[in-house]
Amino acid sequence: MQVFNSLEELTEAGFSFGLALGVFDGVHLGHQAVLDAARGFDKLGVLTFEPHPVQVLAPDRAPRRILANLEHKKRILESLGVDFVVIVNFTRGFAAKDARCFADELFETGVKRLSAGEDWNFGKGREGNMDRLAEWGNESNIEVSAIGPVKLDGERISSTRIRQCLRDGNFDGAVAMLGRPYSVYGEVVKGRHLGRTIGFPTANVSVNEEQLPPNGVYIIEGNGIRGVANTGTRPTVDDSSRRSLEVHLFCGDVPMAYGWDLEVCFLEKIREEQKFGSIDELKAQIARDVEIAKGH
């Protein structure tokens, strides 16, 4: 995927494109409707913001966990056919920019169509909205599409609602709103190597600000490879309060490659995390977990 770090860089690209605007945390079905509205040209692009605007403007209201960090978001967007992403560094200075000035900068990129949620606001004092963007776009012969909310069970699909489903262990609800299995994305980091000594080498995945599902053992796929994973505090060997994600993939020592980026898709929960009386008991249970995962 091509990455632009400013609208000026995009202006120099010289191709025909539609551009979807927004934060796109999790890239759920509502976000995908915004993407679809921008399709139909040589390329499809996304303009997004880093960090999340609420972290800058109202940090006390910012979610403690997000669904997808920037690298994860780019990976999901690419899988949905997005050709490029424009990353705008969101600062208080950017937020104070005149709305018409920002709109004109968008129009000057050569964009053919802009899309965003119907309630999307921008510019100083949030004075810019989709009605104004459509009015200004019409002056430059640029189509603007305002997308209404996508609903599930009568309620609007949102990242907040998905995070609540995950906290509640309602995977079916999260999957229904995402349109795909829930996943986290992070770097493989060094652990204690205990898994290797008991015959089940694991990758310790650091997901930073992304939201882990509730503690337990899951059938997963890591970069497309089937496996099992444990989220929790590892009570048999650590019994600490710090949560971690340990992944065992059914492919030898591949997950032990430190520094690798791993996308872990959670497919099904096998059981709750539990404390065993010995390492041998833990080993026997992991073997049963592996057989269950391989049988699905």
Image: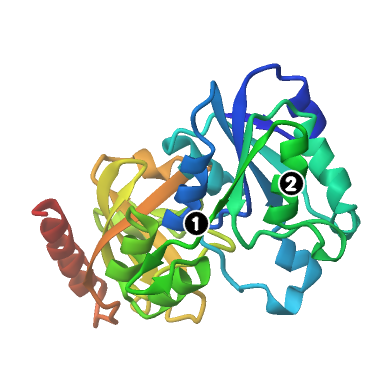
Q: Tell me the colour scheme of the image.
A: rainbow
Query: In the rendered view, does 149 fall on the left or right side of 169?
Result: right
Earlier sequence position, callout 2 versus callout 1: 1
Of the pair 155 and 215, the residue shown nearer to us: 155
**Which x, y percent locates residue 116?**
60, 50
Question: Which residue type does callout 2 highlight?
Answer: Glu
Query: In the rendered view, does 193 fall on the left or right side of 159?
Result: left
What crowding class fits label 2: few (fewer than 14 Cα within 10 Å), some (14-19), or many (20 or more)? some
Query: How many numbered marks have been drawn onto this rendered protein structure?
Result: 2
Above or below: residue 115 compared with residue 282: above
**Which x, y percent locates residue 294?**
13, 51
**Which x, y percent locates residue 173?**
32, 70
Task: Say which element carries label 1.
Answer: loop
What crowding class fits label 1: few (fewer than 14 Cα within 10 Å), some (14-19), or many (20 or more)? many
Of the pair 220 and 106, the residue shown nearer to us: 106
Q: Which residue is drawn at 75% across and 73% down?
A: 59
Q: Which residue is drawn at 31% across and 75% down?
A: 170
Q: Which residue is drawn at 19% across and 74% down?
A: 281
Find disc 2 in the rendering and name its residue: 135
Of the pair 109 and 237, the residue shown nearer to us: 109
Residue 26 has which mark?
A: 1
| Residue 258 seen in the figure | no
Of the pair 278 and 252, the residue shown nearer to us: 252
Q: Residue furthest top?
A: 14
**Which x, y percent locates residue 290?**
17, 57
Question: Which residue type does callout 1 highlight?
Answer: Gly
Quarter of the image where the N terminus is located: top right
Query: In the rendered view, does 210 fall on the left or right side of 215?
Result: right
